[in-house]
Amino acid sequence: MSYVFDTAEIRQTIDMISQQHLDVRTITMGISLQDCAHEDIGRCCEKIYDKICFTARDLVKTGCDIESEFGIPIVNKRISVTPISIVAASCSEEDYTPVALALDRAAAETGVNFIGGFSALVQKGFTTSDLRLIRSIPTALTETELVCGSVNVASTKAGINMDAVKMMGEIIRKTAEINPMGCAKLVVFANAVEDNPFMAGAFHGTGEGECVINVGVSGPGVVAAALRECEGKPFDVVAETIKKTAFKITRMGQLVAREASSRLGVPFGIVDLSLAPTPAVGDSVAEILELMGLEKCGTHGTTAALALLNDAVKKGGVMASSHVGGLSGAFIPVSEDAGMISAVESNSLTIDKLEAMTCVCSVGLDMIAVPGDTPASTISAIIADEASIGMINTKTTAVRIIPAVGRTTGGRIDFGGLLGSAPVMPLHTGSAEEFIARGGRIPAPMNSLKN
């Protein structure tokens, strides 16, 4: 497929890149590791390391070459792999940390920023391997630098595995006590998708091919700049403006994805057209919502504004790419968005409002710091609430929450880089201990019966 750009489009793209923080957030190579299974964990790790290093040997160089030749910033080059609970199922060891270390070495060798897939899919129940992987998470994610993990605990079709929800609250609590940074690399999902290029939740699904290239684009600053030109105009105009802007952003991502696919000799998968903010001023989803007329993100009207934004982004993006997938929409990670941080610090944005916003955005409660003494049962209850939103609404939701050990409400925890820093948010103090202790499964909703 060839693309024809006119002079005006080229000028617009240059302005977007130089002044409005437009970038390709990630080129993510998905790699199947199903053929790396082996009963000896040492041999399994060797096969994993060798396959990743061989398959992704040119990924970073190719991304840098495209970045240089086209003048388009490509912030991250990443790898996602088959959920390790599947790959390591033949091994008899109880601790899968050696596999995480092998992934970390392979990521370092190939030069990527992160590798995702230390994951398990337990929405309906556990295999022995799933349990081993989950119990290994605290050590695995704190002893590695580049490895990310995820656990899918619910789906519209299966309901919510409340035993898994309980376990993940305990795992997050334990991980935070070792190193809170481990929690920043861990996502708990409902309705996880198989082709998500964004970390920390990326994994290469079992329905995917041997290897694939997925690209995630971003551009909150570009959308914000466009909305400044329609101040005071009706929402029809706002939606149309966002749609046109999303088209331009996604078209750039499609170009990069096709180019990377061709050069690497790997099939093109999808473009994820999510608006992913950064801590940089002017690259904020919260700012977009405020440009629609809200005094502060989190005030009344915020959920409606986010719903409009999410829908318009998708409508504009699907016209620009032959394959749109992943999560696609607007992300609201607190620590990674300067406007969100400001809204939390001014007490405009609360955990309850964030939960309401997740009903209409791409993912869920993302990069939220909570007091260090938060009980595991409270964390589990937060996960259960978010999973129920995903289950009932047939959408992906997630929780990436960080207990800030040693800190209380009003403090701050710094992660650095794109992960930014998060103010510690207050939570409800009522206990959910008895609720979480029930275990079992919350049944799938009526809207799951579609056959």
Image: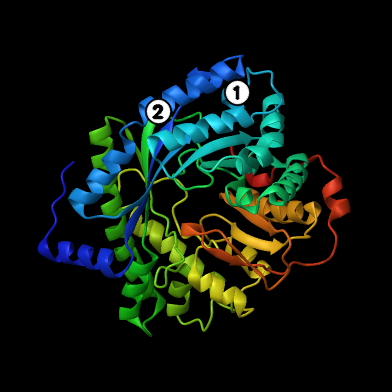
The x, y position of residue 65, in whole percent, is 23, 44
How many marks can you see? 2
Query: What amino acid does circle 1 point to?
Result: Ala
On residue 53, which mark appears? 2
**376 vs 351: above or below:** above
* In front of the other: 388 or 35: 35
Residue 86 found in image quarter: top right
* In front of the other: 75 or 252: 75
Label 2 Cα neighbours within 10 Å, binned few <14 / some 14-19 / many ≥20: many
On residue 88, which mark appears? 1
Residue 90 found in image quarter: top right
Secondary structure under badge 2? helix
* Residue 123 visible to an observer of this rendering: no
**111 vs 436: above or below:** above
Name the residue: 19% across, 51% down.
70
The x, y position of residue 215, in whole percent, is 36, 45
* In front of the other: 173 or 272: 173
How far separated are the C-alphas under marks 1 and 2? 18 Å
Name the residue: 23% across, 35% down.
263
Name the residue: 56% across, 32% down.
101
**330 vs 292: above or below:** above
Mark 1 vs mark 2, foreground winner is 2
Secondary structure under badge 1? loop
On residue 159, which mark appears? none
Query: What amino acid does circle 2 point to?
Result: Cys
Mark 1 / mark 2, whichever is N-terminal? 2
Looking at the figure, which quarter contains the C terminus? Answer: top right
Name the residue: 49% across, 47% down.
199
The x, y position of residue 11, in whole percent, is 16, 66
Looking at the figure, which quarter contains the N terminus? Answer: top left
